[in-house]
Amino acid sequence: MKIFDLHLDLEIYYRYPEFLNMTFKSLEILDTKRHGDIPQFLKSNLKIAVVNIFPFEFKKNKWEPININKFFERLESFVKWIKKFDVFEIILNRDDLKNNLKNKRIGIILGVEGLNFINKIEDIYKIYESGIRVFGLNWNIDSKFSTSLKTITKSGLTEEGKALIKILEKLPIVIDLAHSSIYTSKDVFKYYKKPIIFSHNGIQKIVNFEQNLSDDLLDNLNKNKGLIGLTCLPYSINLNGEISFKIWHQALKYAKDKYKNNLAIGTDFFGFKFNKDYKGLSNYLDFSKNLKKFKVPKYILFNNSFNLFLKSL
């Protein structure tokens, strides 16, 4: 049972463990009071994960974008940390993906969660050359290119944003709309011809939360041949105060028949506070045991994501 995780926020744990109710310690130590570590990943058979650099900092009680130089500093620092552990390898292209299947290492595909720090569109090339392969258009703050889930406007891509995605379309990368507004998402479906992902989202028909996808967006995703990474984000699977694997599995069951080829895993582990009371998904070990127990198909666990990245990189 291999797992391809479309959204593992390991860089946030590295940088901001105090926001997560977790103690920072070596990843080589098993600690079930955090979302994951190397022993948990290996026992769960995590094979590939998209790990985003988070380009914001907490100042004066709110999150603000960092500048592009600081982004590159964060990226360099995180990669240096990851490379201390022989179990990880950075994946840059389809050959790396194929080779990863032949070894016992955990592949890391680097991404970025929001493009607010970009000064000009041409910066995209520098970011690509630095190793970033997944471009999240937004986090929870609008950029000059597109609007986020938290927007108060009723528009999506700006003119600069349309030019931006045309550049992205020509690069071997993947666009992530996990935090983009419905207006941005619909514009991307209209102007961008390659498959996209919603890396850590839920199903609106199960839980009516802003980050969960409506049937309309799922239909568009199906036509686009893209993916939704069904997430463990508490808000996305909170039903009448219960947060559990059972509700995560309800979302899967709702979407499994009609959207079989569009379903994947996107835990968002390390992207929210640790809570031991989340039933069946308090950490990677907990979650993977239930994936096995409930016989979640391997096309959802791994194949759909692997095939999309194999075509895109």
Image (tube, rainbow, N blue to C red):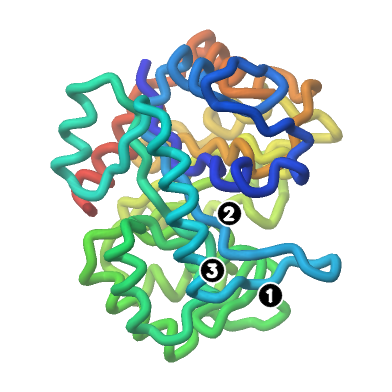
The residue type indicated by label 3 comes to Lys
Give the residue at x 41% y 71%. Answer: 188
Q: Tell me the quarter of the image containing the N terminus.
A: top left
Residue 243 as seen in the image, left or right of residue 224? right
Secondary structure type for disc 3: helix
Tell me if mark 2 has few (under 14), some (14-19) or many (20+) residues whose alpha carbon lies within 10 angstroms of its own.
some
The residue type indicated by label 2 comes to: Ser
Observer-nearest of 18 and 120: 18
Query: On the image, numbered disc 2 is attached to which residue?
Result: 214
Name the residue rendered at 44%, 38% in the picture: 82
- Separation (CA) of disc 2 from disc 1: 18 Å
Q: Which mark is residue 151?
A: 1
Instruction: Residue at 49%, 87% (x, y): give it.
Output: 158
Q: Which residue is mark 3?
A: 70
Q: Position of residue 60 (x, y in %)?
A: 84, 70
Residue 177 at least partly seen? no
CB of mark 2 within 8 Å of CB of mark 1? no
Q: Position of residue 208 (x, y in %)?
A: 72, 49
